Each structure stands twice: as structure tokens, then as C-alpha cells.
């Protein structure tokens, strides 16, 4: 079981915003979890008229159990006029994180 954070750019009532979501993902590997979170993130973004930012952070959570393969655990929407890459760089990928990269 993995917890994956995804990012969506959306305009709400004319205001550019970024939504940060955490979903639980039932997968065997980090690579599989990231792919599933990317797929779900794209579907979700399309469903709300947003744009998926193709940036996923995953954490293995071995003790969680959920009924569905992907469940939303957390969501935050932040107003911002930053571009997609600028937003990720400012709030999530500053270069000072201690995490592994998966390709």
C-alpha cells in the first residue's frame, strides 16, 4: 500500500489554483504506485477541468488497508499565479528534499 501525492492546476471562479491531493494506492512497487497515481490524477484533472502536473510523491504505507485501489486521503487547493513548474519548484521540489527518484 502506498500513499501518493499528486498536483492539479485548476482555475476556480477566474482564480488560478493548485490542488494537492493524497491518494492511497494498492500496488506492489513504487513504480506501479506512481503509474497508478499518475493515471488517476489525469482522470481526476480531466473530470474537474484541470491540468495534471505529472509530479507524484509516494510513500510506502504497509499497514494501511482500504477497500478501493485508489482513494483520496487529503486535498489542498492553494491560489497561485505561479506556472506549473514554478509552483512545484517553490513548494515541493526545492532540491533540498531527501527522497529517491523513480523513473
Image (cartoon, helix red, strand yellow):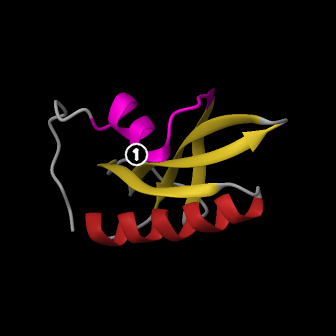
Total residue callouts = 1
Residue 49 in picture, x, y percent from top left = 75, 58
Looking at the figure, which quarter contains the C terminus?
Answer: bottom left
Query: Against 44, is 80 above or below?
Result: above
Residue, x 44% and y 36% (percent of image)?
87
* Relative horizontal placement of residue 46, taking residue 70 as reference (left or right): right
The quarter holding residue 81 reads top right
| Magenta residue check for 76 | no
Residue 25 in picture, x, y percent from top left = 46, 60
| Magenta residue check for 82 | yes
Looking at the figure, which quarter contains the N terminus?
Answer: bottom left
The residue wearing badge 1 is 85
The quarter holding residue 50 reads bottom right
Query: Against 74, is 45 above or below?
Result: below
- Give the residue furthest to the right: 13
Bounds of the magenta span?
78-93
The quarter holding residue 66 reads bottom right
**Can see residue 29?**
no
Instruction: Classify mark 1: helix, strand or loop.
Output: helix
Residue, x 29% and y 38% (percent of image)?
93
Crowding near the residue tagged with mark 1, few <14, some 14–19, many ≥20 C-alpha atoms within 10 Å: few
Residue 48 in picture, x, y percent from top left = 76, 55
Residue, x 58% and y 66% (percent of image)?
42
**Can see residue 55?**
yes
Query: Against 74, is 70 above or below?
Result: below
* Relative horizontal placement of residue 83, taking residue 1 as reference (left or right): right
Instruction: Return the residue nearer the eye: 33 or 38.
Output: 38
Instruction: Return the residue nearer the eye: 39 or 85.
Output: 85
Instruction: Return the residue nearer the eye: 22 or 38.
Output: 38
Amino acid at each position: 500500500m502506498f500513499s501518493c501525492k499528486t498536483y492539479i492546476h485548476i482555475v476556480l471562479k477566474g482564480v488560478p489554483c493548485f490542488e494537492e491531493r493524497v491518494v492511497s494506492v494498492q500496488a506492489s512497487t513504487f513504480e506501479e504506485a506512481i503509474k497508478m497515481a499518475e493515471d488517476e490524477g489525469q482522470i481526476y484533472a480531466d473530470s474537474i477541468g484541470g491540468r495534471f502536473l505529472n509530479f507524484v510523491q509516494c510513500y510506502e504505507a504497509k499497514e494501511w488497508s482500504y477497500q478501493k485501489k485508489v482513494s483520496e486521503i487529503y486535498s489542498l487547493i492553494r491560489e497561485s499565479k505561479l506556472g506549473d513548474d514554478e509552483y512545484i519548484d517553490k513548494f515541493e521540489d526545492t532540491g533540498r528534499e531527501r527522497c529517491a527518484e523513480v523513473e
